[in-house]
């Protein structure tokens, strides 16, 4: 689904709308998705991932959101959490994240915790791999189910991984989600079925592992991530080789640990 102009809210489900930040890049795709969650008829809302400390974007988000009961963070990267302190000060809402470094006037999130806010019930899933503090947020209302996936599952392409073993476990958890659960990602367009997308991610990771194994047979077991990238990612734009090295390092760590 095509994105609207930057800063203009787009309704995705009856309880979720997105405000796209004007910070496109090879890492953020079209930009950071700031999510506004509100049950129909609820006076206040939940903000998820305010974005960077871009005051113009944050002012548009606050204007679109109205009263904010709670600000939630999916993970530690600045394009998601950087604007949280400003937003908390402007709205008076507490900030909660899995890592207490990013919390404001609130306790850290807990795995499987259920949060009631904005007329909704949200379930926290700790889904490490992209980062150690990554979480997804499950929400369902009036027969519509959705999961906010941060950077664990993107709307397009795949994500950078720092701990592959943990990430594969997280993907298996998401692949077991109820069919038809809408993906509300941190970057890229929303997707229709989380279980299908997570299964595709798992297949992609297994295929990459096979490619890395083949590269190691060619290069030797002490090959560097850069050497592996030059073989496995030979058909990928070189501007993405830096992030690819991070994922390859995670793959090498995973294989060597086994």
Image (spheres, rainbow, N blue to C red):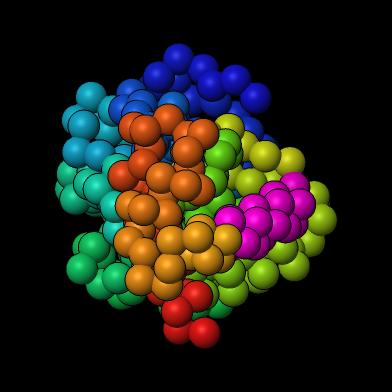
Nearer the observer, 120 or 78: 78
Name the spot of residue 120 as percent of width and height, x first.
Answer: 59, 56
Nearer the observer, 137 or 247: 247
In the picture, measured across the screen, residue 237 lies left or right of residue 182, that is left
Residue 99 versus residue 201 in the image, above or below:
below
Residue 173 versus residue 179 in the image, above or below:
below
Residue 195 among magenta residues: yes
Nearer the observer, 30 or 36: 30
Residue 96 among magenta residues: no
Name the spot of residue 226 as percent of width and height, x first.
Answer: 33, 52
Identify the residue shown where x is 56% and y is 39%.
157
Identify the residue shown where x is 25% and y is 39%.
52
Instruction: Tell me where residue 42 sits by quadrant.
Output: top right
Identify the residue shown where x is 25% and y is 72%.
100
Residue 198 versus residue 32 in the image, above or below:
below
User: Where are the magenta residues, as a range?
Assistant: 193-212
In the picture, measured across the screen, residue 215 lies left or right of residue 57, that is right
**Residue 139 visible in this rendered orientation of the protein:** no
Residue sticking out furthest to the bottom: 258
Instruction: Tell me where residue 66 sits by quadrant.
Output: top left
Q: Quadrant of the N terminus?
A: top right
């Amino acid at each position: 689904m095509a994105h609207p102009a930057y800063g203009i809210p787009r309704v995705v489900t009856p309880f979720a709308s997105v405000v796209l930040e004007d910070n496109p890049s090879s890492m953020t795709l079209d930009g950071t998705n700031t999510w506004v969650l509100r049950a129909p008829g609820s006076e206040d809302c939940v903000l998820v991932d305010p974005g960077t400390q871009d005051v113009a974007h944050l002012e548009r988000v606050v204007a679109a959101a109205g009263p904010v009961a709670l600000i939630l963070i999916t993970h530690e990267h600045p394009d998601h959490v950087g604007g949280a302190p400003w937003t908390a000060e402007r709205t008076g809402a507490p900030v909660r994240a899995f890592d207490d470094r990013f919390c404001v006037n609130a306790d850290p999130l807990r795995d499987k915790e259920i949060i009631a806010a904005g007329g909704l019930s949200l379930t926290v899933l700790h889904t490490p791999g992209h980062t150690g503090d990554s979480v997804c947020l499950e929400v369902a209302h009036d027969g519509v189910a959705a999961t906010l996936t941060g950077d664990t599952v993107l709307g397009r392409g795949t994500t950078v991984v720092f701990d592959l073993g943990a990430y594969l476990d997280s993907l298996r958890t998401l692949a077991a989600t109820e069919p038809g659960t809408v993906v509300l990602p941190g970057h890229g367009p929303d997707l229709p079925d989380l279980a299908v997308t997570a299964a595709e991610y798992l297949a992609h990771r297994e295929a990459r592992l096979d490619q890395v194994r083949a590269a190691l047979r060619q290069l030797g077991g002490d090959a560097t991530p850069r050497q592996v990238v030059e073989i496995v990612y030979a058909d990928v734009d070189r501007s993405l080789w830096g992030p690819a090295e991070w994922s390859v390092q995670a793959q090498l760590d995973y294989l060597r640990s086994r």
